[in-house]
Image: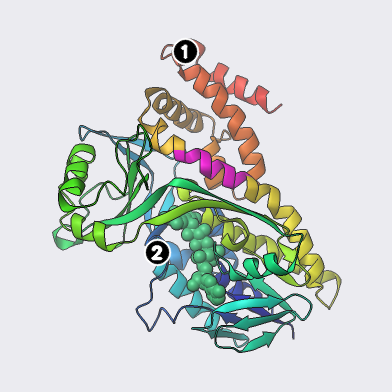
Amino acid sequence: MSKITIIGAGLAGSLLAIDLAKRGIAVDVFEARGDMRTEAVDAGRSINLALSDRGIAALREVGMDEYMLAEAVPMTGRMIHDAAGGTKLLPYSGRTGEYINSISRGGLNIALINEAEKYDGVTFHFNERCTDVNIDACQATFSSGSSVDAQAIIATDGAGSAVRRSLDLRFDDLISTSVFLDHGYKELHIPPASGNSFQLEKNALHIWPRHQFMMIALPNFDGSFTCTLFLAKERPTGELSSFAALSDHTSVTQFFAREFPDALELMPTLVEDFFTNPTGDLGTMKCWPWSVGNILLLGDAAHAMVPFYGQGMNCAFEDVRVLSELIDMQSEATAQIDWRSIFTEFSSIRKPNTDAIQDMAQDNFYEMRDATADPVFQRKRELETKLEQTFPDYFSKYSMVTFREDLPYAVAKERGNAQDKLLMDICSDPENVGHLGLDKIIALIRNLHA
Ligand code: FAD
């Protein structure tokens, strides 16, 4: 029986453990934190996440999709909140049944660990922080001083991957670059109303776009919302505010009263939350190669991205699905798994696609904080919705990324960018859509891809 070491029992590592165990591959999973099922450990960044089709497809492979969706709140569109407190819903898709799902990070992680532990070959080792890997011996060393030899090591230890750092030190060819935004993020809280009812529209992802900064809110199962404020860390010239400038009770309250008055009314613990909760960093990390010998980086360890397309976890789950397809293909051909060749093939298939979603996630920051408040962008979203309602085989860029697990991210990016440019041009004049008509517009789009 093959024995694999997984470093990191976060979202990708736990799903990967199930996936490998289902194929009869034994796994040891080493996790730096304590067991989140029995100890109050921080589940990591962002309390809730948007789960969409690529992630659902990977959960389906291990029979966990329906179970997880039962614990999620569907979000059918973006609810835009303007500065005067007005709202407008921009649906994510013109087709029925296409929506994203707000899910608890901790709940999902626990469900995946529980499921993985049902398999005989899976063992979790908590409070085991990997500090180093030896490439030639395929050996991982931990802060406790212990070490383990493995047939292969898969590092799912997240954006700050210790395995990646260790490879970086020992393997001259590894190139990794991290680009951090000037903006950071902070999570805040809107509690449920009486009877666990929602104080804002339940089935939407709420956005307060304010050009230089923005706040979003995702619903939780208990009727609360988790808000995330994205704001410059320091105040660059011309910026209205920054985390550094919001240094006391008065400045925080005045900022929220000016920028998010409708949300402020619903946030009784705002000031306490603001000063208790950490300010997180936002960055894109690209590296290459992802595999050295029998060691592979996967998920955020290989391609951390900013969260503005809601795809980091979905992409990491898609990594797991693609890797297991490659294992299946090789297992059909030979009894002995050649991990090195699988890892090399996996990396070359995934890299163009993860580059594409990392770039789109970065671009979407500007779309969310600026464009969602822009009338041309709003007209374009309305046109895209009408096109999807009228021509079900038309997919906007957002739909291709979010609802088409059959379409590689790189294809979604190329087609989506071409469509976006055309539609933004058309929508720059409010009369154009009426003049051209939907039939002519769809013909122009089809011509782009001919
Ligand atoms: P992680 O979830 O980071 O897991 C890494 C695990 O490794 C952790 O358990 C950690 O404790 C462990 N670990 C770390 N170092 C070591 C070590 N040295 N030894 C052993 N264990 C170690 N994605 C979406 O798809 N949708 C969203 O809506 C979304 N929203 C987000 C919002 C925010 C604010 C942020 C920051 C991210 C968001 N993401 C979202 C991205 C998503 O969180 C990540 O892409 C996802 O968590 C990646 O999973 P992972 O398992 O690769 O890494």
Q: Give the side of residue 173 with respect to residue 122, left or right.
A: right
Q: Quadrant of residue 380?
A: top left
Q: Quadrant of the N terminus?
A: bottom right
The residue singled out by tag 2 in the image is 70
Q: Which mark is residue 432?
A: 1
**67 in relation to 376, above or below:** below
Kindly identify the amino acid type of the residue bearing the numbered disc 1.
Asn
* Earlier residue among tags 2 and 1: 2
Any magenta on residue 241?
A: no
Q: What's drawn in magenta, residue-wise?
A: 356-365
Kindly identify the amino acid type of the residue bearing the numbered disc 2.
Ala
**59 in relation to 34, above or below:** above
Report the residue that reaches farthest toward the right. Answer: 334
* Scheme by which the image is coloured: rainbow
Residue 98 in view of the camera: no
Q: Nearest the camera: 73 or 185?
A: 185
C-alpha separation, residue under disc 2 versus residue under disc 1: 43 Å
Q: Nearest the camera: 400 or 387?
A: 400
Task: List x then y, in percent, for residue 117.
Answer: 53, 83
Q: Quadrant of residue 12?
A: bottom right
Task: Label the magenta part by its dominant secondary structure.
Answer: helix
